[in-house]
Amino acid sequence: MDVSYPYDEKWHHVAMTYDANKKEAMLYFDGKPGTVPTSYESPLIFDPKRLRIGDNEFHGMGFTGGITDVTIWPEVLNAEAISRHARGEISTDFGKTLFSLPLRFTNTEEARQANGSAGFDAQNVTWRSANVDHPMAKDQNWVFAQFRSQWFRHQQAFGALGALDYRRGNYQRALELLIQSVNNGRYMPELKLRTGFGGNVAALSIAMAMKKCDHHDEYERYRRTVNEQLNKFDMRTWENSGELDVMERIKLKTLQREMNALAGE
């Protein structure tokens, strides 16, 4: 599930609903449906002792940006209620909330005093003064929680192990490790490859592992993206400032030919 997000330095409303009976999840963005109802078999169980906002408990990778007004409701909100919430009109028709945290304070000192009280523990957060209109904040002077992501620290190790497993013929294990290396430790088969993210070698290896694991459509999508990136440079023998050195280009071009050979090219 994914929703296009405008990086425009403005506040936006994001909501996710989960229907336990239908086992379907759905995303809303600024009060409007961002996805169709999507099958989600795993149950969502609320445990306030393990609730983390803007962070990933297992991999240390989280969200970069500002978050305010986190609310969890005990039942599925309808589209009309979500639309009103996006405008700052919070409905009381759905009973008491399971969880409600504004993450907005009058000033930095008030935010620091709240930290550590009533189970509220803010880490990797900067309390930043707000200067952009917010649908829930009526006062001009307030601060919000700006989160700073902690990136996955073992990217190279996972990538090297994935490449080794690929050469040993352990293609499924290789695919899992390689995806983890570029996805902050998480394995998600539907990963969307971003050009240049995680390194060209990892992208080439993921493409080949996709093919070996019979994910042919994903292989073709990755292959097109990687080829577009690697076809931008030629095999020259001199060095220019800021470009990949000769040995690195030879390695990448060799892997590129191997990747394309799997498609019969």
Image: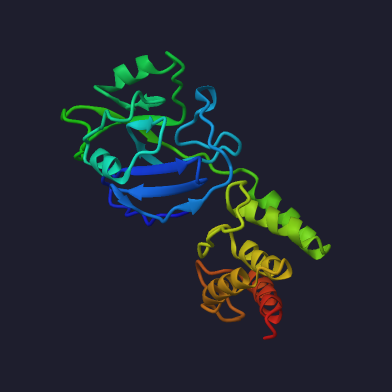
Q: Observer-nearest residue: 21 or 263?
A: 21
Q: How many marks?
A: 0
Residue 126, percent across and down? 37, 30
Quadrant position of residue 211:
bottom right
| 119 shown above or below 260 | above
> Which residue: 80% across, 60% down?
170
Quadrant position of residue 75:
top left
Figure coloring = rainbow
> Which residue: 24% across, 34% down?
130
| Quadrant of the rendering where the C terminus is positioned | bottom right
| 108 shown above or below 244 | above
Q: Observer-nearest residue: 233 or 52?
A: 52
Residue 113, percent across and down? 36, 14
> Which residue: 79% across, 58% down?
165
Residue 243, percent across and down? 53, 69
Is residue 239 visible in the rendered structure shown here? no
Residue 46, percent across and down? 51, 29
| 202 shown above or below 102 | below
Which residue of the protein is positioned furthest toward the bottom in this rendering? 265
Please state if 125 lies on the left or on the right of 59 as rendered. Answer: left
Is residue 247 visible in the rendered structure shown here? yes
Q: Observer-nearest residue: 227 or 137?
A: 137
Please state if 24 lies on the left or on the right of 68 as rendered. Answer: right
Please state if 50 lies on the left or on the right of 257 as rendered. Answer: left
Which residue of the protein is positioned furthest toward the right in this rendering? 168
Quadrant position of residue 142:
top left
| 124 shown above or below 175 | above
Please state if 169 lies on the left or on the right of 239 as rendered. Answer: right
